[in-house]
Amino acid sequence: MKIMIINPNSSAEMTAADGVAGRSVASPGTEVVAVTPEHAPASIESYYDEYLCVPGILNEIQKGDAAGDYDAYIIACYGDPGLHAARELTDKPVIGIAEASLYTACMLAARISIVTIIPRFKVCVEDMVAAYGLSHKVTVRTSPLYVLDVESAPVGSLESLREECRMAKSEDDAEAICLGCAGFADFADELEAELEIPVLDGVVCATKMAEAIVGMRRKTSKQKTYKYPEPKPFTGIVTDFGTLPADDRKRVAG
């Protein structure tokens, strides 16, 4: 089994960390490859960033399917940007790290808190939680952290995250915590030991979920909603996205 983890931002350090997180729980025989898109923002902290990172994600999936040796894809950004579009592009399972961590948390706890990055990102995350139908059991708590703070000041980042996680448990009655940034992966085990409740990293959850779905030999439904994109011309900077691989065009036409 071969899984691609796509880090939608341009940080090579974060891409490497995503790969380490995925491989830390991957089963023997599972190959985890972490990639950085050619076109990507430095970090993803707003709707603007999310929308602009999506072409890079789709391009990596196109390349992966053209190579023909990937069994699943993981989008390693906690807003799950481009998730539905990615599922249209391939019949392989595509897992968002937020969705994976939330579904996992729902099997472990009744009340969940997401602890994420800067305050402006809160509504983005709340909207995503609502779309997953989980607003009734999930609260969102922000921190002063920017995505790249984890690289430049890891010790201080852990302290800020620790404080918000403690308040999530005491003030929000959280019985499990989802870390709302792929860059927080290294902190999950230490925080869980301190808080004595499940603390979930999305990359880890997504890796195990991808393995499970591939192991069940299931693929993304092409019945209606996630059918392959309709062939049509695109112009300007998205011209390349109007050209599907030849085998995909046949499936669209069929």
Image (spheres, grey):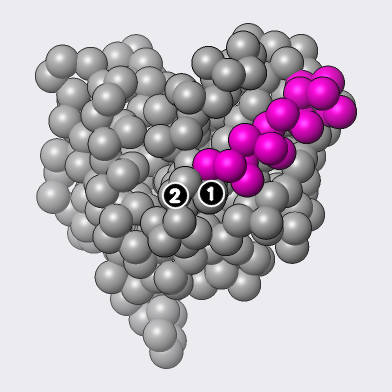
Q: Nearer the viewer, residue 235 or 52?
A: 52
Residue 108 - label: none
Q: Position of residue 16 (x, y in %)?
A: 26, 48
Q: Residue at x 48, y 24 (%)?
A: 190
Which three-letter amino acid code belongs to the residue tagged 1?
Answer: Ser
Q: Residue at x 40, y 85 (%)?
A: 237
Question: Does the magenta run of residues contain 159?
Answer: yes
Q: Is residue 28 left or right of residue 193?
A: left
Res 151 quadrant in image: bottom left
Tell me the SS state at disc 2.
helix
Q: Residue at x 78, y 32 (%)?
A: 167
Residue that numbered label 2 is attached to? 154
Tell me the SS state at disc 1.
helix
Residue that numbered label 1 is attached to? 157
Q: Position of residue 46 (x, y in %)?
A: 64, 65
Q: Is residue 83 left or right of residue 40?
A: right
Numbered range of the magenta stretch: 158-174
Asked if marks 1 and 2 touch (Cβ < 8 Å), the reply is yes
Q: Is residue 37 above or below residue 179?
A: below
Q: Is residue 23 left or right of residue 137?
A: left
Q: Nearer the viewer, residue 22 or 206?
A: 22
Q: Nearer the viewer, residue 234 or 184?
A: 184
Which three-letter amino acid code belongs to the residue tagged 2?
Answer: Pro
Q: Residue at x 74, y 62 (%)?
A: 120
Q: Distance from label 1 to label 2 (Cα)?
A: 5 Å
Res 145 quadrant in image: bottom right
User: In what quadrant of the picture does the N terminus appear?
Assistant: top left
Q: Is residue 64 left or right of residue 171?
A: left
Instruction: Residue 17: tell me if it is visible.
Output: yes
